[in-house]
Image (tube, helix red, strand yellow):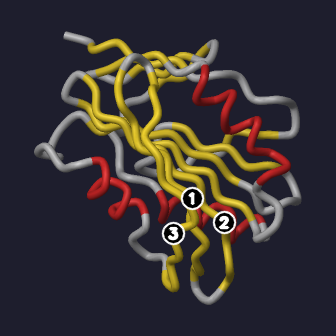
């Protein structure tokens, strides 16, 4: 199941830059610096290529990821950015979608049921455009297991604050 979690996080995320530091809940990249809310114990950081931040919860199949892309994205709509996060998933079924405020900007939050390699999953996705960067937040869980840790995802979002560098 751990391998599946890592695969889901990798495929659900938009690629980011490679030079990334993370200390005291602050992530720094050449173009942007951002803070995220802290996660409760049980989530552990995992390192995946082209991912700013990724966390998995031991033994549950749940995973979270956060990414910022500040180059090469043009100016797609929040709906298009959400569709990009869904690439690789099949039998996608939109459960809900709503606009929300995040770090002083409008963001799009979406919930989907889908399959990855025939395995059903629940997805909670948030996309935001700010200061010429695209931020995406992804929460993946086995069916019926997402709601229990949704407060963790919400805490990650509520602590989010970005700052353009340079």
Q: Are marks 3 and 1 in contact (CB under 8 Å)?
A: yes
Question: Along the horizontal axis of the image, is 132 left or right of 34?
Answer: left
The answer to which image quadrant residue 19 occupies is top left
Q: Nearer the viewer, mark 2 or mark 3?
A: 3
> Which residue is labeled 2 in the image?
122
In depth, the one of 20 and 9 nearer the eye is 9
Q: Residue 162: give x, y in percent of width and height.
A: 40, 17
The reply to whether dot 2 and dot 1 touch (C-beta < 8 Å) is yes
Classed neighbour count for the residue bearing mark 2: other residues with Cα under 10 Å, few (<14), some (14–19), many (≥20):
many
Element under disc 3: strand
Q: Residue at x 67, y 38 (%)?
A: 153
Q: Is residue 139 left or right of residue 16?
A: right
The quarter of the rendered structure image containing the C terminus is: top left
Residue 4 point in image, percent of width and height? 68, 71
Image coords of residue 66 (percent x, y): 51, 39
**Would residue 71 be found to the left or right of residue 67 on screen?**
left
Q: Residue at x 36, y 39 (%)?
A: 18
Q: Earlier in the sequence, mark 2 or mark 3?
A: 3
Query: With respect to residue 2, does 53 lie above or below?
Result: above
Q: Could you tell me which residue is drawn at 68 percent across and 79 percent down?
A: 120
Q: Earlier in the sequence, mark 2 or mark 1?
A: 1
Callout 3 environment at 10 Å: few (<14), some (14 to 19), or many (20+)? few
In the rendered image, which residue does mark 1 sit on? 111
Mark 3 — residue?
94
> Which numbered disc flags the more N-terminal residue, 3 or 1?
3
């Amino acid at each position: 199941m751990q391998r599946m979690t890592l695969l889901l996080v990798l495929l659900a995320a938009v690629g980011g830059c490679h030079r990334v530091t993370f200390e005291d809940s602050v992530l720094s990249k050449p173009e942007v610096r951002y803070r995220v809310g802290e996660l409760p114990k049980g989530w552990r950081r995992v390192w995946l290529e082209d991912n700013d931040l990724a966390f998995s919860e031991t033994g549950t199949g749940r995973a979270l990821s956060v990414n910022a892309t500040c180059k090469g994205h043009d100016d797609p709509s929040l709906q298009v950015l959400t569709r990009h996060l869904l690439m690789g998933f099949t039998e996608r079924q939109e459960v809900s979608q709503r606009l929300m405020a995040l770090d002083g900007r409008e963001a799009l939050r979406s919930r989907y049921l889908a399959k990855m390699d025939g395995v059903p999953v629940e997805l909670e996705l948030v996309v935001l455009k700010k200061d010429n960067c695209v931020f995406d937040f992804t929460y993946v869980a086995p069916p019926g297991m997402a709601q229990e840790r949704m407060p963790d995802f919400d805490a990650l979002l509520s602590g989010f604050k970005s700052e353009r560098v340079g």
